[in-house]
Amino acid sequence: MAISNRTEEHPLLKPGRERLAGKVAIVTGANSGIGRATAHLFAREGAKVVCVDLRDDREPRVDRLIQSDGGEAVFVQGDVGKRESGEAMVQAAIDSFGKLDILFNNAGVGVHKPLHEFTDEEWDFVLNVNLRGVFNGARAALPRFLEQGHGNIVSTASTHGILGTRNYPAYCATKAAIINLTRQMAMDYGPAVRVNCVCPGPIDTPRYRGYPAVARFPEGMTDEERHGMGDSVPGLHRMGQPEEVAYCVLFLASDESSYVTGHALVVDGGQTIDA
């Protein structure tokens, strides 16, 4: 399928500087939001990318978007909450590109309601994707990283792993867990493997707008009104864009951050300044 004007989807991405030349990366939650922008950026910076997502119904699918921009990518459909999906995505990297250097555990979900209203299924759903997904990805990648003597893991946590927020108990709990799991893995697996995470604030993504969780924006809200919701963010007074998080992930995944490990990089426009 021909794709025209394909780079317009991520207008904040700049021409690549080969910061990931020769690298092979896995990105989970790659077909939407932060994951999609990061997969696109990784490829533009020279990486070959294994794009993992439960859904493949967004067009162009992320691997095709990357290919249309001159990059190399394959797509793996899978549920990161299942061990076999973690193993399959690592195997796809080896089968397709011969190695694995970077794992970006990005897939995440949320259910917006008070804790006492959660069903067991809802609670398990959030924990399985957000926390078990990191576990499954790291468990599958770490033996490969240890065997070759190097590797890099970055995960998506959240400012809600640092701050509380109303009616988001499972999300806050899992994101806080990811931050401390990042620190713990950095201790166990350094110096061969660096482990870091990013903590995005309000980012204008499909998940933030209500997919697949409960919608936060009223139906019919214009783009201008939606972006105006970021006015309450101290500092930059706006929502962030997926590409702005992607560049922070790139820093942690690249050799430019060679002395950074066990770190939770806050990317929030100033949301946590007055916390």
Image (cartoon, grey):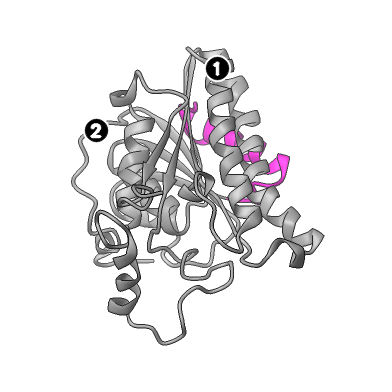
Q: What is the x, y in percent for residue 222?
A: 33, 82
Q: Is residue 52 left or right of residue 124?
A: left
**Residue in view at x 65 percent, y 35 percent:** 135
Question: Which residue is outermost to the bottom?
Answer: 220
Q: Cα distance, mark 1 to mark 2?
A: 29 Å
Q: Residues within 10 Å of mark 1 (few under 14, many from 20)?
A: some
Q: Is 106 located above or below residue 90 in the figure? A: below
Q: Is 209 located above or below residue 201 in the figure? A: below
Residue 173: within the magenta? no
Residue 92: within the magenta? yes
Q: What is the x, y in percent for residue 74?
A: 48, 46
Q: Amino acid at mark 2?
A: Glu
Mark 1 or mark 2, earlier in chain: 2
Element on which disc 1 rests: helix
Q: Is residue 264 left or right of residue 171?
A: left
Report which residue position mark 1 lands on: 187
Of residue 126 and residue 22, the one placed in the foreground of this image is 126
Of residue 19 and residue 257, the one placed in the foreground of this image is 257
Q: Is 158 located above or below residue 104 in the figure? A: below
Q: Amino acid at mark 1?
A: Met
Magenta residues (range): 77-103
**Residue in view at x 35 percent, y 74 percent:** 226
Q: Is residue 244 left or right of residue 110?
A: left
Q: What is the x, y in percent for residue 22?
A: 34, 27
Of residue 269 and residue 235, the one placed in the foreground of this image is 235
Element on which disc 2 rests: loop
Which quadrant is home to the N terminus? bottom left
Kindly tell me whether residue 3 is visible in this rendering: no
Report which residue position mark 2 lands on: 18
Q: What is the x, y in percent for residue 30?
A: 48, 52
Of residue 161 and residue 143, the one placed in the foreground of this image is 161
